[in-house]
Image: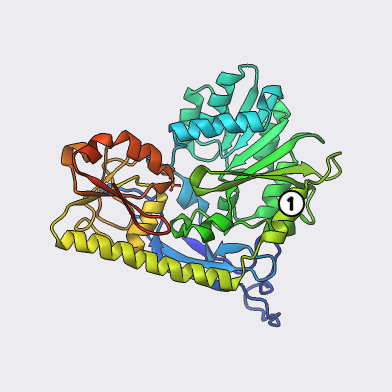
Amino acid sequence: MYTNHVRCRACNYGPALVPEGIKAADNGEKLIPVFDLGLQPLANSFRSADEMQDGFAPLKVLLCPRCSLAQLSVVVKPEILYANYPYLTSGSVTMQNHFDRLFDDLGVAELNSVVEIGSNDGKLLAHWKAKKPTLKVVGIDPARNLSSLAFQRNIGTVVSVFDKEAARSANAIQPDLVLARHVFCHVHNWEEFILALAEMGGPETRYVIEVPYVRELLDNLEFDTIYHEHLSYLSIKAMEALLAKSPLELDDIREYPIHGGAILLTLRRRGAEIMRHVIVDRYLSMEDFDEERWKRFALDSCNHIMDLTTKVGELAVAGKSVCGYGASAKSTVTINACHFSHRHIRFICDDTPQKQWKFSPGSDIPIVDEGALIRERPDYCVLFAWNWSSEIIAKNNQYLAAGGKFIVPGKTLEIVP
Ligand code: TYD
């Protein structure tokens, strides 16, 4: 189900890899364990009671002392993680606004063609095409179920993992912009990814990668964004180490509040007539994601998990009913870290049809439609999808008016109202 990961995927720090049976001299290089949630289920393996369960894998973060890349100690087979992927790009207002902002900030109105890697169900490309009907677009995504949704939106998709071959197929439209939103940190072999990127476009093409930034994870205690799909927790120092010998270089960095804090990295072909943005050096000078910083994060996360476990446990003992909102991958991490069961959290509301009437992975907590919050009126609702909290709280006024309360996990537990 998974392989162990021992060498840094950005700078290759780690023990020498030698053929089985041959002993190599110890080079003294070891990635440092800094965070460990033990064995955990795959965060998006939502199953109905009679469906095959996928099993558990270690969820442990290793830190590279050379380039500061944090990465999981195992790589779960992509065929298992992504064969039938239930994650749909959100259709929320927040997400539409983000697509609009990217359209403006990346100057898409002036472009002819865009390739999106990890195009999911085609929402972003369809949104951009509606704003600029002459824009040529192609998506690349391995999930068959999602690509057929994209085809229904008239978004052509190369159904494949992203590799050189997929890149060459998509390159038929000669992209001015290649976009990869929240897919880079799901990729195991970064060197191949960057080489496949470089197969597309020409000297002026921009390659834009949106990823969560490790600073937000550490500063905001977003431990629930650590799960098997997220193989790496990116720093700019690690990105620079990776790109050092590649045909592409880092040109610009921007920050966006989406998904708890993301950065947009713009890469260009080396030698393109573009001055390196001073911002890259500014980021490098501010980064301090060392072992000490990770150890503090691990301790704070443990305390947070204990606080939430105690709070929900006390409510259950006091006879209060508690549900959850947002069967996000984050919810799977929190539920399993807190050992919650149906006794603690009666159900989780979620608007994704593919998740409804299934169980939260690793637990017996059912996922139901959003209307259950009003129908069942639990006393408390844990907002597992905290990254959408303002939108979800705003649309559930009726629940609050009837006396319901949201528990919002963040740096501290907030009870609303
Ligand atoms: P999300 O935070 O997008 O992703 P991840 O799985 O990477 O943690 O997941 C949010 C979940 O919340 C998703 O399953 C959809 C659901 N949701 C609702 O049910 N209602 C809403 O109004 C919103 C915004 C999300």
In-front residue for pair 351/356: 351
Left or right: residue 354 compared with residue 399? right
Q: Can you tell me whether the CB of the residue at mark 1 lies under 8 Å from the nearest atom of ligand 1?
A: no
Q: Residue at x 61, y 56 (%)?
A: 234
Direction front: furthest residue: 417
Q: Is residue 382 above or below residue 109?
A: below
User: Callout 1, which amino acid?
Assistant: Val
Q: Residue at x 28, y 45 (%)?
A: 358
Q: Position of residue 181 (x, y in %)?
A: 58, 41
Q: Is residue 39 above or below residue 227?
A: below
Is residue 371 visible to the viewer in this orientation of the structure? no
Q: Report ligand 1 position as a quadrant.
A: top left
Question: Which of the 4 image quadrants contains residue 93?
Answer: top left
Q: Residue at x 39, y 43 (%)?
A: 389
Left or right: residue 265 compared with residue 35? right
Q: Look at mark 1 in the image and give the residue it sits on.
A: 280
Q: Residue at x 47, y 57 (%)?
A: 222
Q: Is residue 301 above or below residue 384?
A: below
Q: Position of residue 61 (x, y in %)?
A: 52, 66
Q: Position of residue 362 (x, y in %)?
A: 32, 58
